[in-house]
Image (spheres, rainbow, N blue to C red):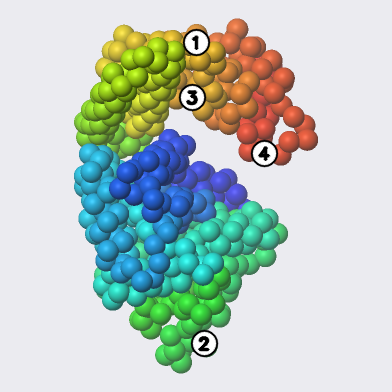
Amino acid sequence: MGNYQYFYNLLSNIEPSKSTKNYVSSLQSNLREYLKNSEQYKHKHIDTFISGSFAKNIAIRPSVNEDKQDVDIVVVTNYNKKTSPEHILTELKDVLSIREKYKNIRLQSKSVGIDMANYHIDIVPLIAEDNHFWIGNRENNEWILTNPKKHIEWSTRINTDNENKYKPLVKLLKWWRKRKNIEQVRLPKGILLEKLIADNIGNSKYDMENLLITTLENIVDNFKDDYIAKKIIPTINDPILQENNLAENYSLEDFTVFIELIQQDLEQIKSADFSVDIWKKIFGKDSAKSIEETQEEYSLTAKSQIDCLLNEVVEKSQELAINIKEYEQKKQDLEKKETDISNRKKNIQSELDDLKYTLYIDFIQEASNSLSSELIKDTGREYWIKKIETLEEINKKKRRGFRGYEHNYLATIYKALELHEKFYDSICSMVKDNFYLSIYEVKDVIEKTPYRITLINSLKAAIKHDDYSSTNKSFKEALKLLEKDRK
């Protein structure tokens, strides 16, 4: 065999981009802030978190012909099972509908669906009762036991037990399944596919190619004779909730076709002597969207994204107006208490500054995640500089500076505007603030010798030799790249 480089490149190509991961994270945090501060919902809201493939770090890029990428977000509420699933889902939909950015919303059987730009978001309300989580189905008015956080922990444990090769293996088979588009047949997906892989995973000492082959062989060996040949639909127990059969809604034909597809590909692979060409035929020659296709998608959705951002500006401006009116009323009521009024005035101004800061930094974050360099540049340098100067003025008043993740957003804007010195200062500030440094950001520094030396020094000062975090690892990789290029 020995196709290490091919599988390394394949996994890199099907991995969601950093901007996608950041954007998904912001979707969840924005939703959480909105619900916990909503007058209509804050008394019901307990927690919000990402679940599904993004939470487990097994998400893959959408293929070229896919319209949107799926994102699962859980909302934990303090309802109980006496309340109908229909009522809980409808109330969540009504609350979200108030906000302009969530206008493309609809009720689903167990969730509320929202379409935003390149993403389809499933927001799933759960109830926490009797030390368990329950998910409601409005179609049959039933409550089903669930535990998404335990599923995330299980996935991490399986990955650790298999030398961190389980999750890459899941990504490969998810991409493989995506290419097998067969009408009227449901191939295993989601937690069922993950459990099948976990139950049949090969020796993790193998490289990825050998591990994939042995895992597929194990699946065929364990299901062909004992189930398919005997026309028995297998029972696949949920790894957390053992009473749940993950294969309950799958037919014998579904499993038969699944096993046959695996067998066919194994035969092709072996007859072609495990060549790279046969792997490309199975996984596809182009395993990810091209840069041009990605830019085209962003161009098509840029207007709708900007519209959403502007709607947020309008909403927050209205909130500011309400706050000011409340302040004026209180000022009239407390005319005799000048000291209290003065202090209140300062507090209101501070709150206004905080709100404006959040608004502007969220706007810059959305732009850095969602807009291409060309769109940022076309908006005009003065437009962005004014917003950044406003943020700097507020920080000066608060006697603080930008944080590492904020420098990450600013670096994207500075790079698009070709403000090189500010871009490199932001990169160095990310290191000083111990924020994860992308290797792609480092490559932009290599040709600029003075800035490269500054970044090298910053990295040497920041690296901790007994720290095994992903951030410290990114610093070491960046330093290695920079010093290698100097030789």
Q: Which badge, 4 or 1, comes first in the chain's sequence?
A: 1
Residue 429 in view here = yes
Q: Which badge, 2 or 4, comes first in the chain's sequence?
A: 2
Provide the residue designation for mark 1: 396
Q: Amino acid at mark 1?
A: Lys
Mark 3 and mark 1 in contact? Answer it, CB < 8 Å: no
Residue 225: image tag: 2
Mark 3 and mark 4 in contact? Answer it, CB < 8 Å: no
Q: Amino acid at mark 3?
A: Glu
Provide the residue designation for mark 4: 469
Q: Which residue does the image show at 69% across and 23% down from the upper left?
A: 462
For the residues labelled 1 and 2, the Cα–Cα distance comes to: 71 Å
Q: Residue furthest front?
A: 336
- Number of the front mark, 1 or 2: 1
Q: Which badge, 3 or 2, comes first in the chain's sequence?
A: 2
Q: Amino acid at mark 4?
A: Ser
Provide the residue designation for mark 3: 406
